[in-house]
Image (spheres, rainbow, N blue to C red):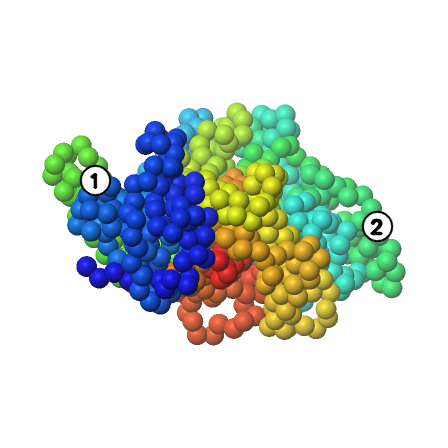
Amino acid sequence: MEELAFCPFSFSSTFEAIHTLISSRSFGLDTTHEDCALHDRNTEHGSGDRNRTIGPQNVKHEVVDPGAEPLRVGFGNPLEEPVCYISVGIKLPQKRGYGVMIDGNFLDLREGPQGYYGKNMGESESNSTKCDCFTAGLVALLLLPVLANNTYISENALMPGSASNMLSTRHVADANEFLKELTDSESRSKASPIESQRLIVRYMSALDAEVTFHKFYPQLNRFHPLHFFTGPDSDILSENATCSSFGINTFGIIRAPRGDGKESIVLVTPYNPRKVDLGEALSLGIAYSVFSLLSRVTWLAKDIVWLVADSQYDEYSSVAAWLREYHAPVFRGIDIVTSETCNESNTCNEFEQRLYLDGKLYGGFRRAGTMAAALVIKVSEQGNYYEDSLNVYAEASNGQMPNLDLINIVNYMAVHKHGMRMKVNKMWSLLGFQWVNTLGVIFESVGQIARSLNPQWKFGIPATEYVEGAATLASSLYYQALGVPTGPHGAFRDYQVDAITIEISPKVSLTKMIRRNEFILRGGRLIEGVIRSINNLLEKFHQSFFLYLLASPSKYVSNGVYMIPFALLVAPLPLVAAYLHTDGGKSSSQATSTFEVDASRKSWKWLNSARKVLVIHLWGVIVSLLPYFLCQIPNSTSITTFILWGLLSAFSFLILCLILGSPIFDVAASPVEKSEWASLKSVTVSAAFIGLSLMSVINYATAQIGALLIVPICLMARPLKLDIQARNWKTLLRATCNLALGFIGFPPVAFFLMKGALEDFHGINVGDYWNWVESLWTWNSATYLYVGVVHLPCWALCIHVLFHSC
């Protein structure tokens, strides 16, 4: 057996380092004697006297490069022929013996007849546990389409489809008359919105509705930290706001003959009076046919509000402005704007006077009862050429979803009563991925095997259904994580009102009158059936789920199921943090004994790592606040702003380290500080676990995607210096994986890779990331805070661990 040893002149320093690392372990090395005897110091486990010599008395010395392999100290069984050596990369004799390996700051005790057994049992078990948990989390995430359940209506009082439709061709004829006059008025008045608004008021008033209007001004969407969670201030208006730049929301209220005015149902139809297209006109026609029916029925128990939202400045903005006035009126905002911006013209007063000329226009802002639900009706001009279809958009801000029963009602009425095909958003790029189809085939085969063993085991779905479900789940997860509403219905969810956007797509062109009448009849009866079910409710939606992912219009994954993959992904984090803290504490406590550090430093040594983590997270807060100041720069492009943001972030990082005295880049750090990378990783992993857990409460989808990006680098982060010094394929592979994960985990890189994978890499520019971040804070998305305050600091700390000078 070949023996390699360090040269004699380095023995003193080598043994001192060995003594520092292993003095608290089961065996110690007595360096005070020239015989280099190995002594048993394990009094805790009762293995003999404190200084009983069990090692040999002779040492062989040969010159060798000490950086070739990890330093190892070996010693034989005292009952056998004694052999003592200090060697590099050498195995023990083929007899039962003991060995101690020093690998960086870690020390492993090994035992066995064939060399080294049981490689650092604590670390081995930790590695096995974290790998098993993370792998199980990925598998569980991929199994979600298989685990999806069929939807069902939880609230028995809804009773969808239990009553016959009352909407007839007479109501359709009235709607056609309204549409004809509206389009003619629009063609005559050209760009003037006054005539079309007067026409809507007149038709609503003819139905004995309480009609009024709501005037609003376009708001300035600008990032402000104090308004992040409270929404934009209603007094912050666009700089271009003038007397002629206001919008008009027209709405009418039908009082329920069997109600007490305490509850209401809202219908919303976006409408641009300056440019009316066929889709908006048809949505107005469908809403008017339903509104005219409901004004005559006797079974209505909830007030009906029909809001014609002025969408010339944005569909969401007009609905949000109306809801703010409905729930929290501001009595001084309009007066201020009028006095400051409308002195030069009397256009506003002229508009108001002309609206009062026809019909019953009520003064003031009229209100109905508490909103039970809201339906946003839209018509798409482009059909699918196969059948009338229905697209439902349900995602609101920060991943909020309406009660699942509301979607179930629409799905039941559309599919089973009116023969429409209901659709939800899909991530179409996933349909073309071969690996997704391969997974579907595998799960289908496993299901067939399971059913052959036991017919009652209902596992597995067809491969095509799995691909469709995976694409729909990915889309639901993405839009919830984005935190941006997918339609004007999102404004209602901010007031805890269940709302969805229904977009009806016709089968063929609606230019022919016969086909248009049929389309309005089917769409009107669909809305009638949904309203009738909601009218049956005795209380707000509460029976079904509020936290779910859609796998199809008729399948869902509840929070009790989709939290399993997330829990498995983050479960290794506290385990690794606890292991690193315990193991690092043992090593560090022995290292400090050599440098004569007091007992208080030994007990609170982790505070140094906690200080570094705190500094980096403070830097993350500063990076998140920088866009508030960058938005003040006039005429700046997205690319310029993004580059300036990056430069200021780096500069603020250096300044913060200098002010707080962080030793992250301190070249004069003590050997104790250099040996505490394990403690730093422990605190970093703990911070990542806390951040992901809190984010899962605010927005699960963001936490799930964030865990997929940050957990691998947190688990695998290890100084590259140690892996390179080891010079074996396992450590080099780990170092390569760490570099790759560090690159992918950087937020801009992750954004561009995800965008390229889901869309296309062509046409991507640097400014796209700034535009994406800008949309997050515009909609007050908590994902923006997660990226800046949790993900970015944890990523930076993991990179610091990788390049640690241990």
Residue receiving disc 1: 79
Callout 1 amino acid: Leu
Q: Is residue 395 left or right of residue 96?
A: right
Q: Residue at image x 69%, y 60%? A: 658
> Which is more N-terminal, label 2 or label 1?
1
- Residue 464: % across, % down: 25, 53
Q: Is residue 274 left or right of residue 330?
A: left
Residue receiving disc 2: 335
Callout 2 amino acid: Asp
- The tally of labels here is 2
Residue 678 shows in this picture: yes
State whether residue 360 is above or below residue 665. Answer: above
Q: Is residue 565 left or right of residue 626?
A: left
Circles 1 and 2: CB distance less than 8 Å? Answer: no
Disc 1 and disc 2: Cα gap in Å?
99 Å
Residue 328, picture quadrant:
top right
- Residue 395: % across, % down: 50, 47
Q: Residue at image x 60%, y 26%? A: 259
